[in-house]
Image: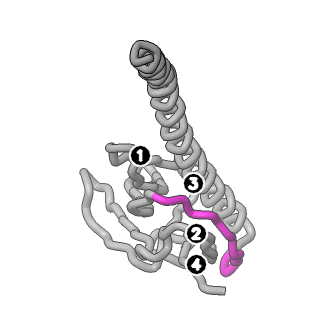
Amino acid sequence: MRARKAQSATEFAILIAALLAIFLPLFYLVSDYGLKSGAEIVSTQIYQIGENVVAEARQIYFLGLYSKEVVTLNIPENILGMSTLVINSSAGTENYLFVKFRREDQVLNHSFYSDIPIITSACMRSDCFGDATCYSCELDPSAYLPGMKHYRLETVIWDVGMAVRVDQVYI
């Protein structure tokens, strides 16, 4: 009788070990895939936000001075900063929108080129290189907290001519 109990206990232990050997690696693969998929989704959302802001700013810019529009964006988690950079030199003007974010253990920047100046209410002027003047503009930190946010895009007169100013609005 004891031999049967010992045999069934051994069989049960072997069965549990076999199930763990199958399901633990499977669980690891699925969870790893889920984490990578989540990071890719956030990266795609950030790309869409940048492209959308640049496209809307361009449209507002060409509508003329004091044109404005409110856009609603769903801001994902892990965004660490949003800023713009305008480089004005004798060769012309270069304009960029930057979104800084955390992806897994890395801090990354997506940069979006714009053919029109995009600014915020908080801009700093500095000499960057040669005859170029740089304008670095930061969005308020509350503007890139996760969730639905509303931004006003408005064409304004600025140091180097017309620009589109982007600011968060509360509706």
Is 81 rendered above or below residue 129? below
Q: Which residues are magenta?
A: 65-77
- Is disc 2 in contact with disc 1, using a CB cutoff of under 8 Å? no
Residue bearing the label numbered 4: 156
Residue at image position (56%, 38%) is 37
Q: Residues within 10 Å of mark 3 (few under 14, many from 20)?
A: many
For residue 171, which quarter of the picture?
bottom right
- Looking at the image, do the residues carrying marks 3 and 1 touch, with CB atoms under 8 Å apart? no
Please provide percent x and percent y for residue 16.
46, 24
Say which label, 2 or 1, has the lower sequence index: 1
Q: Is residue 16 visible?
A: yes
The residue where tag 1 is placed is 103
User: From what the image shows, is residue 39 above or below residue 163?
Assistant: above
Give the answer, above or below, for where 169 lies relative to 76: below
User: What amino acid type should be assigned to the residue bearing mark 2?
Assistant: Gly
Q: CA distance from mark 2 to mark 1?
A: 18 Å
State the predominant SS element of the stretch in magenta. strand
Distance of label 3 from label 1 (alpha carbons)? 17 Å
Mark 1 nearby-residue class (10 Å; few <14, some 14–19, many ≥20) = some
Q: Position of residue 97 (x, y in %)?
A: 48, 56
- Determine which residue is flagged by label 3: 50
Which residue in the protein does label 2 denote?
147
Q: Earlier in the sequence, mark 4 or mark 2?
A: 2
Instruction: Identify the mark nearer the N-term, 4 or 3.
Output: 3
Q: Nearer the viewer, residue 128 or 56?
A: 56
Q: Secondary structure at mark 2?
A: strand
Q: Are marks 4 and 2 in contact (CB under 8 Å)?
A: no
Residue drawn at (52%, 67%) of the image: 146
Mark 3 lies on a secondary structure that is helix
- For residue 20, side relative to residue 107 (left or right): right
